[in-house]
Image (tube, grey):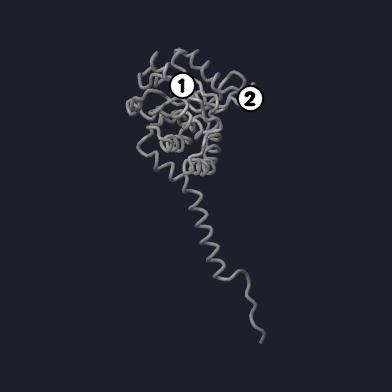
Amino acid sequence: MPPLLRKGPSRRTLRRSYQAAVLLSVLAISPLTWAWLSSSGHRTVAGSSPDWISEVPGAPAALVFGAGVRGTHPSSMLARRLDVSAQLYRAGKVRAILLSGDNSRKDYDEPTVMRDYLIARGVPARTLVLDHAGFDTWDSCVRARDVFGATRVTVVTQVFHLPRAVALCRAAGLEAFGVGDDSSRQWAAATYGYAAREFVASAKGLMDSLVNSAPVFPGPRETTLDAALRSG
């Protein structure tokens, strides 16, 4: 009788494949876990309760990250970030607002659009500081510390981005608390898409923090935030 032929992969191969899959899964979620744990206790959700703003500790400045503009108008999600920062300012939770975004080309200027939006809503221009080289979250955090001299900030962004933003600012040496807008209420599909991107973005952010990457434009030191805080 001829020997039976083995069909398919061996039990040993299957076991190793399973172990590799588990390892890859752990590696994939590790940066997200790091961001979540590092920011735990240092974040809240805007509008989560009638007195949510009372949960936000006072800080000299809010740090608002850019999130896309169309011509002279902020994207819907960026507008919500700016609205939240304006609420914090009016409530006396911050005295200045640092607007950090992409201005890598002449026809695209996130910080200026952010400033104009807030001025149109009654936030004094003297309290607004522009960082034109906030090309990603890590750069914004490091430049807030090194270029603008910030030591304590209230980070303002969307909930899906909040753990990474707070974790990176704290890794950069800032005393950071975060306030997030729950964009899933209005833009569920876009929110879930951005949330999925956090797997890759968190891995990059963790690596940046571990090697202490220098921002694209590391300086020089500016005094615009100091002046805004004095005026505020």
Please name the amino acid that badge 1 sits on: Asp
Q: Which of marks 2 and 1 is in front?
A: 2
How far across and down, in percent of the image, does residue 207 sit?
Answer: 50, 44
Query: Given the current orientation, which residue lies at the most extreme front position?
Result: 220
Which residue matches tag 2?
Answer: 105
Q: Above or below — where is 74 with respect to 174?
A: above
Query: Given the current orientation, which residue lies at the most extreme bottom position?
Result: 1
Q: Residue at x 62, y 75 (%)?
A: 6
> Residue 69's quadrant in the figure?
top right
Judge the density around disc 2: few (<14), some (14-19), many (≥20) Cα neighbours within 10 Å. few
How far across and down, in percent of the image, does residue 40 sit?
Answer: 37, 39
User: As drawn, is 174 to the left or to the right of 133?
Assistant: left
Judge the density around disc 1: few (<14), some (14-19), many (≥20) Cα neighbours within 10 Å. some
How far across and down, in percent of the image, does residue 127 sit?
Answer: 43, 16
Please state which of residues 134 and 110 is positioned toward the viewer in this rendering.
134
Please state which of residues 117 and 211 is positioned toward the viewer in this rendering.
211
How far across and down, in percent of the image, does residue 164 sit?
Answer: 46, 38
Q: Identify the secondary structure beneath mark 1.
A: helix
Residue 146 visible from this viewpoint: yes
Please state which of residues 212 and 114 is positioned toward the viewer in this rendering.
212
> Residue 108's quadrant in the figure?
top right
How far apart are the two marked residues, 2 and 1, measured between alpha carbons?
Answer: 26 Å
Q: Quadrant of the N terminus?
A: bottom right
Q: Residue at x 51, y 24 (%)?
A: 131
Q: Identify the secondary structure beneath mark 2.
A: loop
Please name the amino acid that badge 2 sits on: Arg
Which residue matches tag 1?
Answer: 83
Q: In which quarter of the image is the C terminus?
A: top left
Q: Above or below — where is 104 with respect to 14?
A: above
Q: Count the marks: how many?
A: 2
